Image (spheres, coloured by chain):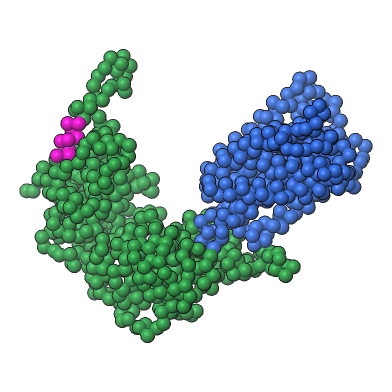
Chain colours: A blue, B green
Amino acid sequence: MNEQKLTLKDLIKSKAQEFGLPRLIITGFLLLLLVLSPIVGADLPTQISNIINRFSWNGILVLAMVPMIHSGCGLNFGLPLGIISGLLGATLSIEFGFEGPVSFIMAALLATPFALVLGSVYGWLLNKIKGGEMMIATYVGFSSVSMMCMMWLLLPYHSPNMVWGMAGKGLRTTISLEGYYTQALASFLQINIGNLTIPTGALLFFALLAFGMWAFLHTKTGTAMTAVGSNPDFARSAGINVDKIRMISVVMSTWLAAIGILVYEQGFGFVQLYMAPFYMALPAVSAILIGGATVNKASIMNVVIGTILFQGIVTMTPTVMNNMIHLDMSEVIRIIVSNGMILYALTRKTEGTR
Amino acid sequence: MEKAPLLEMRNIKKDFNGNQVLSDINITLREGEVIGLCGENGAGKSTLMKILFGADVIRETGGYGGDILINNEKVSFQSPFDAIAAGIGMVHQEFSLIPGFKATENILLNRESKKKSILSDLFSDRLDTLDRNEMNRIAQEAIQQMGVNIDKDMVINDMPVGHKQFTEIARELSKKQLKILILDEPTAVLTEKEAEALLDSIRGMSKRGIAVIFITHRLGEILSVCDRVVTMRDGYVVNETPASETSIPEITSWMVGRDVADTGSSYVTEDIGKDKRTILSIKKLWVDMPGETVRNVNLDVREGEILGIGGLAGQGKLGIPKGIMGLCNAGGEINFDGQDIPLNDPRKCLDASFAFVAEDRRNVGLLLDESLEWNVSFPAMQVQDKYLKKYFGGLIKWRDDEAIKKVTAKYIDELKVKCTSTKQKARELSGGNQQKICLAKAFALNPKLLFVSEPTRGIDVGAKALVLDALKKLNKEQGVTIVMVSSELEELRQTCDRIAIVSGGKVSGILPAGEKLEKFGELMLMNC
């Protein structure tokens, strides 16, 4: 009797350990917020649709972390580079006069060559500085954003929907997607039950890419990618071209980021230029870490769980807190959570020595 | 009655995780006596010296058995600091000097002469200033004692290796309490002239009453400077003789010989494969492997044989397979079965049906964080497209987890790997079982030519026999040509047909495995 109790306790303990204390705390916090929200007077279905919506916006950006983690390049702090490719695709699609959902497809197609080229250069750079990837990636992200801040002004865009009204040139900081691809995916098979809205199309699109990623990791090249991340010397001795595999992973990650930002924009309804890409990497990084990934291991499950938890906290805290204490704390809490998780994950890096 | 010896080691025993490395070591050392300690790599010399010097690693692995007495008093050093305080000095094989400091500063590091100043009076003695003149004087004195002239003001970075070695020795000599000096292969990096100077300074020390334990592979030096020679083998002291009564061949046979009068195990005594075809020919191979540089190796491997490559550590034997397999930068010509194999490209070697079991299991040999299935199947999957299901005319190559599981289970069974399941992580296995997985990985490639480096390093006796038998079986049943690199000569003799001895980055000779031990010994020391 006593023994059985002990094993049950052990079982719970080991499950909890597997799930990880930080994740446990965050899940608990999210559940607490969900319970609190009706009490403080916020509408629960609206809150839940909010979480689902934001999941559909951000899911692919988080998924973009997976290939580079698998190949041992660490967390892709250089996400802004892929996002910029996506933005180039988006603005070009509008400039060329595509409208409606077609503009989304064209944006994705136009973004792809940029993602491939920029991703290759980025991959080449990361192959030169093995061991310091994350540091360099961060600066690649920063500098590419600054570079594009100038380019958005200088590139010869003319579409009146995008350029500054007075000067007639240079892109605005925020461009509305009304008439272009706003809700292009989300409205597909959308489900509405009272206040609860489910953007089925966007979720399906995420599922499609996530399945693609899962399938890729089960192929020969995908297996090689995981092995390169796990032990590059082993992979090399097995005849793998380590640099090539790493390059593939970086290009994949950059392309997913480009597609990811387009999906984000179709949900959000606006294209944000200039400094906006700057703020996209850290939430994606912390989401996948909250999901239980480490700097060299990540699964699709980590992506899903992490995005739900992170976006849940981000959407719930403002409403609940504001209703509770009538003071806007949302930004503070979001910053604490996202940066805290990054810090936590990086301190664990030495533990999982490669 | 005789005066009590300065140092006495009684019945020293040491094991690492049940692996006995030292048994019943008894050594005495008198004032001013110089003893030479020789033995093959792994004979236990370094471990013994670490025990004497109170190294942390000994305590962390469970301490040692037996007693150490200094001046008839039992001592037990908790750290090297205790050993230094008791008058033991040690010059390591690797330099422990600060590169950017001058010789003087290195010699007196942490023992600097100091001057009081107002600040140190006010606060603490940590604010004393250095008394450079006094320091220079002490350093100069130590250097003079050594009998070699090195510039006390030269920065370590700018010194030739020999002078670095002398700086280390001077540092030990400058310690006033020094009674016993341990020199661990100090002449390995010295030129002949420098080595001679060092030997002179050892004689000088001995005259001043400092006892010296001198470890070296250059046996000539031992004979010329030591009073006594202690030979170790497999953790035992096998012989202790006054240096004047022995000779190099004699020491060599003590070093390598188990019982020279043979234990009855069967050796291949004659060169039986002369008529066999040469399958791999290595010409002018150089390999840039740190610590194991290969300079100029010419070697022919015959089809279907087991060729052993032996030699002392650091002579380049490990570099040969690493270079051929493209894991270290290399140059030269490799011809396999009439086909030239390009160097520095691991994939080309694997495509030519080579396989390699590296000596460095944990870093190169295994995916420690992945399952055994992955470890066994990965190279075969990547190189030969095994264990894959192909869809759309080979466009998609899907991993066939079923087939992988099956082949892993097969090898686990064949090689008697102890594990909980095929899904267990490689990290969780013991060294011997990890080695078996490395072999399984190579076997899964169905190689024509298999390189094995140090297949039995760090594994227990049972696993050792199993690994060697598996290699022999592969050779006999499937006709796989095997090149086996090992520092254990006995193991090579029992497994191989021929043994090539590498010394100084070159092949110094090839002998049938059953050849007399002295001959191997001579070859090992030829180019050192």
Of A351 and A271, the residue lying toward us: A271
x and y, in percent, of residue B217 in the image: 24, 58
Residue A60 sits above or below residue A45 on the image:
below
Of B230 and B182, the residue lying toward us: B182
In this rendering, does residue A345 appear at all?
no
Q: Residue furthest left?
A: B1
Residue at image coords 34%, 65%? B296
Residue at image coords 62%, 43%? A75
Image-quadrant location for residue A95 = top right
Relative to A331, is B383 on the left or the right? left
Quarter of the C terminus of chain B within the rendering: bottom left
Residue at image coords 84%, 35%? A161
x and y, in percent, of residue B371 in the image: 59, 58
In this rendering, does residue B269 appear at all?
yes
B331 is within the stretch colored magenta: no
Image-quadrant location for residue B527 = bottom left
- The region drawn magenta spans B136-144
Q: Residue furthest bottom?
A: B275
